[in-house]
Image (cartoon, rainbow, N blue to C red):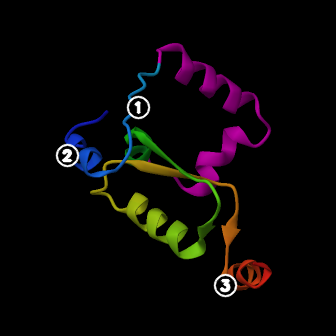
Amino acid sequence: RGRGDGEALRELPGRLVDIVQGPGAPVELAKARRASPIGGGLARTVGASSAAAKKPVLLVYFVGGVTFMEVAALRFLSARPSFPYRIVICATKIVNGGTLLWSLSQS
């Protein structure tokens, strides 16, 4: 865990799983990204700055779907210089108004 996030984590329901990543994983990831045809230029095309690259990564997983508005809100937070993390969003499905209404009509 990072600095000062203990208070926020205590507010969340459920158990806390604290995982410490070993020293070899970032090096292996960097090698894999350089070897990948799209991975090497990904940070440059997205426009990642050196300050953003130094922020720790916060992985946010949505199981069951996420709306475009939720993704936009997290991207907004991640882009703020004062926000301490770079957010990576993973989702099983992205839901819009049409897909939400369709799923409600099927039940």
Q: CA distance from mark 1 to mark 2?
A: 15 Å
Q: SS of the residue at dot 3? A: helix
Majority secondary structure of the magenta segment? helix
| Direction from residue 13 to residue 86 in the image, left or right | right
Q: CA distance from mark 3 to mark 2?
A: 35 Å
| Position of 68 relative to 38 (above/below) | below
Q: Amino acid at mark 2?
A: Glu
Q: Position of residue 57 (x, y in %)?
A: 45, 41
Q: Which mark is residue 66?
A: none
Mark 1 residue crowding within 10 angstroms, few (<14) / some (14–19) / many (20+): few
Quarter of the image for residue 9 reads top left
Q: Earlier in the sequence, mark 1 or mark 2?
A: 2
Q: SS of the residue at dot 1? A: loop
Mark 2 residue crowding within 10 angstroms, few (<14) / some (14–19) / many (20+): few
Q: CA distance from mark 3 to mark 1?
A: 34 Å
| Residue ID for mark 1 | 17
| Direction from residue 54 to residue 5 in the image, left or right | left
Q: Amino acid at mark 3?
A: Gly
Q: Nearer the viewer, residue 45 or 7?
A: 7
Seen at 66% across and 84% down, the residue is: 97
Region rendered in magenta? 22-49
| Residue ID for mark 3 | 97
Q: Quadrant of the N terminus?
A: top left
| Position of 29 relative to 58 (above/below) | above
Q: Position of residue 22 (x, y in %)?
A: 47, 15
| Residue ID for mark 2 | 7
74 in magenta: no
Q: Which residue is the extreme one toward the front?
A: 107
Q: Amino acid at mark 1?
A: Val
